[in-house]
Amino acid sequence: MTAVLLHGAFERACARLPRKVALVCRSGRVSYADLGARVRVMARRMRAAGVRPGDRVLLALESDAPYAAAVHAVLACGGVFVPLTPTTRPERLAFIAQDTEAAAMWVEARFTADDEHALHERCPALRAVLRAGLPGGAGEPGEEGPGGVAAPCADQDLAAILYTSGSTGRPKGVMLTHHNMLSAWRSVQAYLGLREDDVIGLALPPTFSYGLYHLLMGLGLGATVVLEHQVAFALKVAQTIERERVTVFPGVPTLLSALLGLPQLAQFDHAALRLVSNAAAALPQALVPRIRAAWPRAQLFSMYGMTECKRISYLPPEEVERRPGSVGRGMPHQEHWLADEAGRRLPPGSTGELVVRGEHVMRGYWRRPAETAERLRPGPLEGERVLHTGDLFRSDDEGYLYFVARMDDIIKSRGEKVAPREVEEAIHQVPGVVACAVVGVPDPLLGQAVKAFVTLAPGAATSARDIVRHCQATLESYMVPKQVDLVDELPVTESGKVRHAALRGAP
């Protein structure tokens, strides 16, 4: 990785591979030359609207060519992109526009004049609402690179502000510099080994960290990125993997479970698939042999990360069966350790909060000094800050990490501490279980009771009582769910994570 700025690799790919297909999406098959032209047009429109280096620009766009172009156009203007989905609730949209003091926002054509008027009333600092189209043409002659004349920018300048889901409070904007994001890119590339000839099947929203980095890395490498927008329909995703000869497929447990649950999955030709990865949420061990059977030629990477630093660890494919439940020992170019409640380092074989040190760690939370100070604390070097993740892990004697729980999600029942993941792993062993989530709910006698929400495969005869019996046979008594609710689906965020807060508030 030699790029100094985040969009530099994409600009070189446009110059080097103009005729190659960059994107396969709802807009059709878009070449690098075409995408570069669209970047130029969008950059000119923003400059005409008064966007200057350092300005924040919201992207409320679909997973399509305009979104990919807008990301690079904002960077070419020296701006800071703030990705959102076009279905973002008006209250959240207005909050983020106000919080960032956004100068401009890209929206879909269906964004009405009434929508725009209401947004301007709440966010007077917003200077321009720009509707995305798909302009053709090669751009103006003589311009430098896809974005036109390069704006002055340093690698320590902000490239993006990524807002967390905000399921437990106000959304927080994670500030990432060009250097932060390139450092994460370099480390992930070092172990995944993505290539120019790859076809990346992106069914994940590119507005969230996991999907966003695959879009950036793919276009920076000169690969082809397939933006699959019908992610709610597993059959459509399976068809796309076959039709486009997808070689790399990043997934999350809910998406992988849905694909593996297709009765006709074996009928699809997925022989081109060489790499399957999982992140965003821990991969249930019951899925591992099913993934191996469905895609025997593909390497499986189990990974762990968070928006605040992109990625923290990965488990090499050859270790997946040998170390069930592990997310690896950490990725290249970083240091990490476990700490006790007093912040002291713990030796291998301990359980504690995961702490991360490296150039990929965020600058902080946008205009949230108190929350930034809670997460970024003094490190080994004077003036340095390291990331306290808020996640509880255990490590084995060789330093391999095993996720225990979000520290806020630990259930305290009968005076004992229960890690939801341990109960979820047990439930996943029950035949017919597709997905599950375990939370603590208030109980007058226990303090908190363990409650499980479970979705079953179509036609499965498994009952809630069967699940309780299995837990009684495999878990300590205080870990057995007091209640099991069979549900059609689990509430998930747009990034595919289960919304545990919503389950805790469920009747």
Image: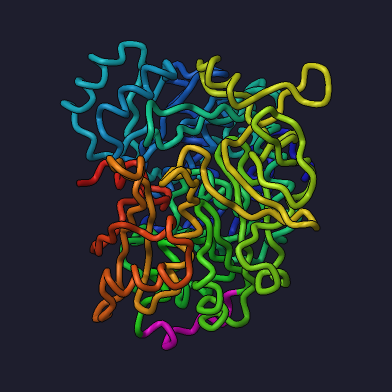
Q: Nearer the viewer, residue 487 or 349?
A: 349
Q: Residue at x 57, y 51 (%)?
A: 404
- Residue sitting nearer the eye, 269 or 328: 328
In this view, the residue in front, 427 or 175, is 427
Q: Nearer the viewer, residue 172 or 6?
A: 172
Residue at 71% across, 41% down = 338
Left or right: 329 with respect to 21?
right
Q: Can residue 236 be seen here?
A: no
Question: Which range is magenta?
Answer: 264-273
Could you tell me what secondary structure mostly forms the magenta stretch? loop
Is residue 281 on the magenta stretch?
Answer: no
- The residue most toward the left is 114
Left or right, 178 with respect to 226, comes to: right
**Residue 468 visible (yes or no):** yes
The location of residue 276, given as percent across then percent down, is 58, 67
Residue 435 figure quarter: bottom left
Q: Is residue 151 left or right of residue 501?
A: right
Q: In the current view of this chain or complex, which residue is farthest to the right?
A: 381
Place of residue 505 in the rendered image (x, y in percent of width and height, measured from the top left): 26, 41
Residue 254 vertical placement versus 166 (above, below): below
